[in-house]
């Protein structure tokens, strides 16, 4: 759950941080099961609540 209806919030699951620009937003999110989401290989489901107009998932994969 995201509070305060920010323009956007970046949720970085790898670093376990939420931010808007350079402002820490960890206090403005409530995590289901108390954990940051983790997308696994293959198909994943993402539930979007009402009032959300856009979600962008940016992968962090590396190619050697």
Image: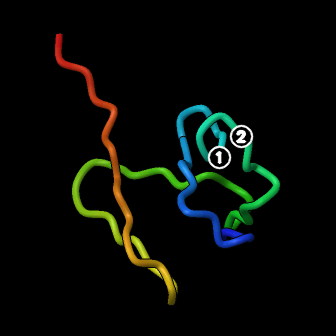
**2 or 1: tag closer to the N-terminus:** 1
Q: Secondary structure at mark 1?
A: strand
Location of residue 4 in the rendering, given as x and y in whole percent from the top left corner = 73, 70
Q: Residue at x 40, y 77 (%)?
A: 53
Q: Residue at x 76, y 60 (%)?
A: 28
Q: Give the foreground label among 2 and 1.
A: 2
Q: Is residue 40 above or below residue 31?
A: above
> In the rendered view, does 13 fall on the left or right side of 1?
left
Q: CA distance from mark 2 to mark 1?
A: 9 Å
- Quadrant (top left/top right/bottom left/bottom right) for the N terminus: bottom right
Q: Is residue 62 above or below residue 47?
A: above
Location of residue 13 in the rendering, given as x and y in whole percent from the top left corner = 54, 43
Rate crowding at label 1 as few (under 14), some (14 to 19) or many (20 or more) other CA atoms within 10 Å. Answer: many
Location of residue 42 in the rendering, given as x and y in whole percent from the top left corner = 22, 55
- Quadrant (top left/top right/bottom left/bottom right) for the C terminus: top left
The colour scheme used here is rainbow
**Residue where numbered disc 1 is placed:** 18
> In the rendered view, does 51 fall on the left or right side of 60?
right
Q: Residue at x 38, y 65 (%)?
A: 55
Location of residue 16 in the rendering, given as x and y in whole percent from the top left corner = 64, 39
**Residue where numbered disc 2 is placed:** 23
């Amino acid at each position: 759950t995201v509070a305060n209806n920010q323009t956007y919030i970046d949720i970085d699951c790898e670093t376990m941080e939420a931010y808007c620009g350079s402002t820490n937003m960890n206090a403005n999110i409530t995590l289901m099961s108390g954990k940051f989401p983790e997308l696994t290989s293959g198909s994943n489901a993402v539930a979007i609540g009402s009032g959300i107009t856009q979600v962008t998932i940016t992968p962090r994969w590396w190619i050697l």
